Amino acid sequence: MFLLLSILVVCVVFWFSVLVAEIVLKSNLENSLHPGIRVGFGYFVSVVYFSAAWQIMTIEYAWWVGCALLFMYGYGKTGFSGIKKIVFSIKTVFSTYLNTFFIFIAGTILFFAPLLVSKTFGPFAEGSGDITIYADVPQFLTKNKMTAFGQIQPSLNKSGELISRILKFSNEDKFDKYSNITQPFIEKNRSKLNPPDALYSTNRIVADVFFLSPYYAPFAQFYFLAGKTNYHVFFGIQSFLYVCILIGVWSFISNFNKKLALITLLITASSHGLISVFYNFYSLQYVSMAITALTLATIVSVPFFSWAGFRLYGLTWSYIIICYSHFAAIISPLILISGFLSSKAEITVKNKIKTKISREFSFYLAILIFSFLFFLYSASCFFQAIDIIKLALKFKEQASVYLGDSIAIFSLKWFSFLFGFLSQQHYQPFAIEIPLAQVTIKIGVVAGIVSLVAGFFLIAKTSTLSTDYFLGKKKIFLSIYGTIFLIAGIHYSFLNSSLYIQAKNFQNLLIFVYIGMSLPLAIASQVENGGKRFSAIKSILTGSLIIFFITLLIPRIIYTLKIANSSDRASILETSYFKEIQRVQNNYPTPFFLFEPRKSADLYLGNQPLFGEKVLPTRHLVLQKVNVAPYRPQRKREKSDTQVVLAPDLIKSNDLPYLWQLKAMKKPEGFIWNATKLTQQKKPKILLFADNYEQNFGERKLKDPLMVGIFSYLRNGAAMLYLPAESSGELEVALEPREQNDYKSLVREIKKRIQNNEFGEEVEMETTEKFVVLKYHLVSNTSPTLITIARYSSEFWLNAQFNGEDL
C-alpha cells in the first residue's frame, strides 16, 4: 500500500504541476520547453506560493486562496470560451503530457527499486536524515490546522501583527522576533517539549522557529493526500524531484543529440552517489539539484532578460537563496549565461480587441496578491539566508570531529565521490566495503578521466570550426561547458576542509560532471568532417562513456541490494511496524512504548504513528531534556538548560503498567515487528538502554575464569530489571570496561552512583582485577517492579545472572 500511495502522490503532483504550468507559464518561450521541464517549474511556482501563504494562513486556506488566484489569473489572461473549447483544451493538454507522465512513473519505480527487490514495502533510508523536519513537522502542523508558525488560523489582527514582524528588517534571533506569535503554541505545548512525548522534537522545532515555511512547504502543500502518516507524501515528492533531475539532464543534451541524451540519462540514473542524496533525506540539497537540472535545460532557449526568464529563474533562484543559500554559487553562473542569448525575448502582439475590464482587473489583482505574498516570503527569510551563508562559511573554515577528516585530493575515494560511484556513507566505518564494487570503481574512474580528457580535446577542436550549425550556437555551447568546469574547479579546489563538506560538495556537482562528460560528444556529433583525429577521439570518448556507464551501474545495483537487505545502516520499516502500533492503540489506553530500533534509521522513520503517545527509543539515541522557562515580555531569550539523559531517567514508577516493548523479530519472511506488554512477562527480564548496545553479544569469561557468561555490549548505557510480582532471588551484575585502561574510571563512577542511590539501597559492590560486580538480594513483592541495576557513561560489557542463570 505504501508504494501504491507514493505513486498516487506522484500522479497528483504531476497533474497539478501541469495545471499550474498551463495557466501561468504560457509564453512562447515557456511553451517551447520539454513538457517535463514545464512540469518541474510548475511545481516550484506552487512551492513558492505555499511557502509564502502558509506563513499567514493555514494550508487549507492557502489552497482556497491559491485556487482563486489561478482562476483569476487564467480568466484574466485568456478568458473562457465555452465548454467545448475547455474540453478540447483539456484533451490537448492531456495528450501533450501523457508520454511525460509515463516517464515520471517509470522514474518513480526506479526510485523505489529497493522496495521492489526486497518485496518489503514501507519507508526506507540508507542511513538517517532530517525526516523529522521535512515530514514530521508538516504532518503535525497541517493535521492540527496550524500555520507554519504553529498558529491556529489567525484573525486579521494577528495576521497583521505577523506581517509587521516579517517586515521588521532586523537580524535578531528568530525566537525573539516572532515570540509574540509563537508564545501561545509554547504555552500550550510546554509539557510536550521533552521526551518521552513522541512529539517533543517536532514541538521544539516549531517552538524555536527552527526553520521557516519554505523548508516544509514542498511536503506540506499536499497534506490532503496524507493519512495517519505522510510518509508516502514525503517519498512520493522525493521521487518526483528525482525524475525532474533525470529529465532535466536528458532535455539539456537532447538539444544536440537525442541518442546521446539517452546515454547521459542512463549514466545519471545509474549514479548511486546521486540517489543517496534522496535516500538520506538531504531535502534542501536535492531540491536545489532538481532546480539546477531544470535550469540547465532552460538556459539554451529562455533569456534571462524576459518575462519568462523572470518567472522561471527568478522564482526558483529565490527559493535556493532563501533555503540553501550557498548553492547560489553553483546555479547563479548558469542563469547569467542565459543573459547572453541574442534577445529571443517574447514578442508580444498587442490585441487590438478591447479586453473586458473585469478580465483585466482579475488578471492584475491575481498578480498583485501573488507579488505581495512573494515579498513577504522573501522578507521573512532574508536574514535566515544570511545565517545559512555564515554557517556554511564556518563549516568550510573549521574542521570538526563530527564532520570527519578530509580525504586526500586525487585519491581513489576522492574520485569515487567526484564521479558519483559512492559517497561517504558507503565506506567504513559506515558500511562494509564490497571488493567487487571497489575494483569496478577503479576501472570506472579511469574511464571517467579518459572521458573528461577526450571531451576537452573535442571541445578545443570544435571551437575552431565554423560550420553552419555553430554560427548561432557556438558561444552558448562553449559558455555552458566552460562555466560548468569553472564552477566545479573552484568548488573542488577550496571545499576540502572535512569529509562531510567534500561529500556534499561532490554530490552538488554530479550533474555538472555527467553533463561535462557528455556535452563534448553531443556537440561533436553535429560535425560531419572533423578529420581522422577528430573521429578517433570521438570513438574514444564514446567507448569510455559506455565503460563508465557499466562500471557506474554495478555499484548502483550492489547498494540497491544492500538497502533491500537492510545491510549496514540501511533500513526498510515494514508495514508490520505500523500495524502493531495500531493494534496496541486500538485495544489499550495510553500505551508507553519502549521502542528498540534495529538501525539508527528506524529512529527517524517511525515517529509519526506514535504521535500522541509516550515513547522512548532504547538505543541509537542521544536524548536531551531541556528546561523551558516561561516567556516574559521584554525579556531576551535565554538559552535553555540542556541535559543529556538516558531512558531510565524518564521512566517513572507509575509508568510500569503502561509499558510496551516494541521490537523486530527475525522471521523467514523478514523482520516482523511485535509489541509485548511488559507486565505480561512471567519471568525477570533485563532491559537495556544506551547510545548503542548489542544485547547478548557473545560469551566472555566471568570473574571465575572457569566459567563463561553471555555478555551484552553497551556504550553510555544503563540496564534495568523487570521483576514480576511474587518473584524473589539473587541478582549478580558483572561490569567490565571495553578497554582495560578504563577500569579505574568504571570503579569510580559506579561508587559515585551507589552513593547517589541510583541502584537502590540494597546493592552491594565487589571489585576484582577486571570486573565490578553489583549484588542484589531481591525480595518478593505483591506488584511488579522496574529498577535500574547498572549504568556507565563509556563502553562496557554487562552480564546479569538471576539465581545463577544468565538473563
Image (cartoon, rainbow, N blue to C red):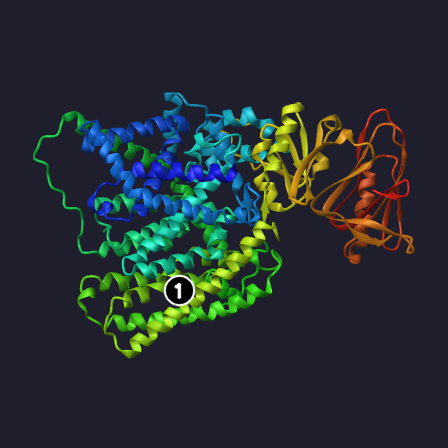
Q: Residue 621 falls in which quadrant of the image?
A: top right
Disc 1 marks which residue?
489
In the image, residue 291 lies at what x, y percent? Answer: 36, 48
Query: What is the quadrant of residue 86 in the picture?
Result: top left
Residue 448 in view here: yes
Toward the left, the furthest residue is: 352
Q: Can you give x and y, in whole percent of width and height, for residue 156 in the image?
A: 36, 21
Residue at position x 36%, y 31% in the image: 53
Q: Is residue 587 left or right of residue 354?
A: right
Q: The residue tagged with tag 1: helix, strand or loop?
A: helix
The image shows residue 250, relative to residue 516, as above or below, that is: above
Identify which residue, 30 or 180, lies in the foreground: 30
Q: Quick one: quadrant of the C terminus?
A: top right
Amino acid type assigned to the residue bearing label 1 in the image = Gly
Residue positioned most to the bottom: 532
Classify 10 Å Cα crowding around label 1: few (below 14), some (14-19), many (20 and above): few
Q: Quadrant of residue 355?
A: top left
Q: Is residue 148 visible?
A: no
139 sits left or right of 546 in the view: right
Where's residue 184, x and y in %?
A: 50, 24
| Above or below: residue 795 compared with residue 732 | below
Residue for point 52% across, 60% down: 555
